[in-house]
């Protein structure tokens, strides 16, 4: 029933019908130059899907505030035009929208980067931010205020000041990045102090409040813990939150972790809601002095039943989710209707959202390739119903079938295996990727609800497929064999055999250290019990709700790998986990290092023996890598049999996903191709 989530609340002057907030996401659609059409459609669909309040991605308060080339400046005329269209669409759909006012500071990827002090971040590639002068600081405060006014004029219902995740306001708070000796970092005696470091973000808040007046909601997203050794202390976090509350903020939203932190917060392997306790602790501090001030918790919540549980604990007043709204714009309506099985869950892969935004591409979603492309792929029931066969129930096939069925076509899915999912059904067996099964299960439910027919254990041939009006071939891939002596020995398995059937206890040598090799190693060394893994995560990263503990714990824990692993991953060349997205690779590889997995690169394979794999090192020496089981993770080959058969029979068809190109199997490309094919048949 979700009674707590469904209870109304007030955010300043706004009356909100429920306590789910669509959190901020930088979409990359902002500078499209289409008058805001794409962005308006993106938000409209999510408001129509039940979101009551959406927070925009960061809108820069001036040119040097931009995070990168695809960020827009709130006071520019084109930005006002874009967001006037967005706010009109949101209001038309019955929702509210808040503008997140943003300054990247030293996280800006561009020569315009500025910061409290000239301290580059660890991925800055030699770019040293320019230290803001006192005059720059006064100007920046004025720019925040002017942007708030511009936002109100563009029709926004509120503004959120971004003071979390290590952006400029957060940079001023931290001694790591604010080493100023003037009033913006130090007391009158020249001693650096937290009170002085707070001065800038509080001045920004005061200026914004003065500019928009008491009735226009102003919220602040603060960092409940920076997850950076040596950064802001717990007492300093508390004092900042209380100072904002005293100054009249309308709500506080809880962020955790800087982008450069070595502690994962958003990846698939992060347990659901892992960091919520930090926001809860801070909420208690704030509520002790300001009981009525709404505090919004967030971070890695993907299911509204979990959000209901968080509210039931009685600390925070609302819960913000971001990526789950990419994956399923209807998450609120479906949850409130009790249709949880239909929800297309965010699987935490980051591949089409965060990873893309980091390289300034428009974001989308692996499990919902329409995300961000609502204008290109409008919904609507077809008036030219076709009978369409989709061959293969992996990610590409399901994306095609889901879109076709939803728009009213008569869809039949043929799946040769006994279960849907393809590569996703393998991935879902990997610890930390269990949620991949949710997206497969929900696709099956949606197909059934739309009247599609799913035929498992059935291989469709040209004779049957010729009767359909359209055919989408998503027959996927098979593991590639390797040409190494001994590869035909009985203890040599393909990754698919290993994951589907398991591996006997003992030493394991993995040939191939790309994404699949790393997944396989995780499959072998990590606990398959989510609760055990969640506890191990808390232990490893010091998750105990205390900002003080977390800021000192991570590096210590990372230096203590567990001994005793019996798995070796081998790679001729390239990085381990190559092909895994930028936000996830370091986490996945780091987890293996932590578990004591040996990773050996720069070798060549001599032969596979009954004892393991003989490898040749660069200096010519030979080493036997123990392997009572040897698993081949050397890429895939496309399943082309069916497409060849269809071509020979002259049956028109669309080939998508790994069946089309298995060289670099990429699930984002696969689902995107599935959607595109669905619109062509
Ligand atoms: Fe979630 Fe992955 Fe979609 Fe991003 S791309 S919203 S992480 S499922």
Image (cartoon, helix red, strand yellow):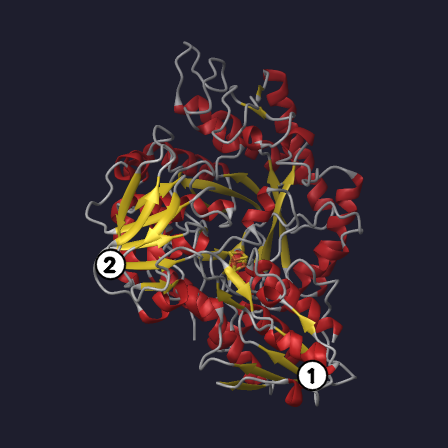
| 80 relative position to 140: left or right | right
- Dot 2 corresponds to which residue? 628
Q: In the rendered image, is residue 281 in sight?
A: no
174 over 481 or under it: above or below: above
In-front residue for pair 504/275:
504
Which quadrant of the view contains residue 114?
top right
Disc 2: CA contacts within 10 A as few (<14), some (14-19) or many (>=20): some
x, y percentage for residue 650? 75, 81
Q: Which one is earlier in the sequence, the residue at label 1 or at label 2?
A: 1
Which disc is residue 409 wearing?
A: 1
Q: Position of residue 152 (x, y in %)?
A: 69, 45
Residue closest to the eye, 500 or 279: 500
Q: What is the quadrant of the C terminus in the image?
A: bottom right
Give the residue displayed 48% in from the left and 85% down from the top: 457
Total labels: the figure holds 2
Q: Which quadrant: the N terminus?
A: bottom left
Instruction: Characterize the local packing of mark 1: few (<14), some (14-19) or many (20 or more) Cα atoms within 10 angstroms.
Output: many
Residue 366 visible: yes
- The disc at residue 73 is none
Q: Choose between 288 and 355: the one closer to the eye.
A: 355
Give the residue at x 40% y 17%: 192
Instruction: Classify mark 2: helix, strand or loop.
Output: loop
* Residue 463 vertical position relative to residue 583 in the rendered view, above or below: below
Number of the front mark, 1 or 2: 2
Mark 1 Cβ inside 8 Å of ligand 1: no
Q: Is residue 624 left or right of residue 80?
A: left
- Whether residues under marks 1 and 2 lie with C-beta atoms below 8 angstroms apart, the answer is no
Identity of the residue furthest to the front in this view: 485
Give the SS element for disc 1.
Answer: loop
Residue 31: x percent and y percent? 73, 45
* Residue 344 placement (x, y as % from top left): 52, 69
């Amino acid at each position: 029933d979700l009674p707590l989530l469904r209870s109304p609340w007030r955010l300043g002057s706004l009356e909100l019908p429920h306590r789910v907030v669509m959190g901020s996401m930088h979409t990359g659609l902002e500078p499209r130059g289409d008058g805001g059409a794409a962005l308006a459609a993106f938000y409209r669909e999510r408001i129509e899907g039940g979101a009551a309040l959406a927070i925009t991605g960061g809108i820069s308060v001036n040119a040097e505030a931009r995070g990168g080339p695809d960020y827009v400046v709130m006071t520019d005329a084109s930005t006002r035009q874009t967001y006037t269209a967005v706010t009109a669409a949101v209001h038309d759909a019955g929702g509210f929208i808040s503008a997140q006012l943003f300054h990247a500071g030293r996280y800006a990827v561009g020569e315009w980067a500025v910061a409290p002090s000239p301290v580059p971040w660890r991925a800055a590639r030699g770019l040293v931010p320019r230290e803001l002068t006192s005059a720059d600081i006064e100007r920046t405060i004025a720019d925040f205020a002017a942007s708030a006014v511009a936002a109100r004029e563009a029709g926004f219902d509120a503004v959120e000041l971004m003071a979390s995740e290590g952006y400029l306001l957060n940079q001023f708070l931290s001694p790591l990045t604010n080493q100023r000796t003037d009033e913006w970092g130090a007391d009158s005696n020249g001693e650096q102090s937290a009170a002085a470091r707070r001065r800038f973000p509080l001045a920004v808040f005061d200026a914004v409040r003065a500019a928009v007046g008491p009735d226009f909601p102003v919220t602040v997203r603060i960092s409940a813990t920076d997850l950076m050794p040596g950064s802001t202390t717990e007492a300093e976090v508390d004092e900042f939150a209380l100072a904002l509350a005293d100054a009249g903020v309308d709500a506080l939203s809880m962020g955790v972790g800087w982008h450069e932190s070595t502690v994962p917060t958003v990846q698939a392997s992060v347990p659901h809601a892992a960091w919520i306790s930090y926001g809860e602790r801070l909420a208690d501090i704030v509520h002790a002095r300001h009981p009525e001030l709404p505090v919004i918790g967030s971070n890695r919540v993907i299911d509204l039943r979990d959000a209901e549980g968080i509210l039931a604990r009685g600390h925070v007043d609302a819960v913000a989710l971001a990526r789950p709204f990419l994956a399923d714009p209807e998450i609120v309506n479906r949850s409130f209707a009790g249709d949880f099985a239909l929800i297309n869950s965010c699987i935490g892969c980051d591949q089409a959202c965060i990873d893309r935004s980091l390289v300034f591409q428009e974001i989308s979603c692996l499990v919902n390739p329409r995300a961000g492309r609502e204008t290109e792929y409008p919904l609507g029931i077809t008036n030219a119903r076709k009978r369409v066969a989709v061959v293969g129930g992996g990610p590409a096939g399901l994306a095609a079938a889901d879109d076709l069925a939803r728009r009213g076509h008569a869809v039949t899915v043929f799946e040769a295996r006994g279960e849907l999912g393809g590569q996703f059904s393998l991935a879902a067996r990997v610890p930390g990727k269990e949620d991949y099964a949710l997206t497969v299960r929900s696709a099956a439910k949606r197909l059934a609800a739309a009247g599609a027919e799913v035929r498992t254990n059935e291989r469709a041939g040209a004779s049957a497929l010729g009767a359909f009006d359209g055919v989408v071939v998503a027959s996927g891939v098979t593991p590639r064999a390797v040409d190494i002596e001994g590869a035909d020995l009985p203890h040599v398995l393909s990754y698919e055999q290993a994951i589907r059937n398991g591996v006997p206890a003992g030493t394991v040598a993995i040939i191939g250290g790309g994404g699949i090799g790393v997944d396989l190693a995780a499959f072998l060394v990590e606990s398959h019990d989510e609760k055990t893994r969640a506890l191990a995560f808390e232990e490893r990263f010091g998750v105990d709700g205390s900002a003080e503990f977390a800021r000192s714990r991570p590096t210590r824990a990372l230096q203590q790998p567990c001994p005793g692993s019996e798995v070796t991953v081998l790679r001729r060349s390239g990085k381990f986990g190559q092909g895994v997205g930028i936000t996830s690779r370091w986490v996945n590889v780091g987890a293996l290092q932590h578990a004591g997995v040996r990773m050996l690169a720069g070798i060549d394979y001599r032969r596979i023996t009954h004892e393991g794999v003989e490898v040749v090192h660069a200096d010519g020496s030979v080493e036997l890598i123990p392997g009572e089981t040897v698993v081949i993770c050397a890429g895939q080959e496309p399943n082309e049999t069916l497409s060849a058969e269809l071509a020979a029979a002259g049956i028109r068809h669309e080939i998508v996903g790994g069946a089309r190109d298995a060289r670099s199997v990429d699930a984002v490309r696969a689902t995107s191709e599935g959607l595109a094919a669905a619109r062509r048949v």
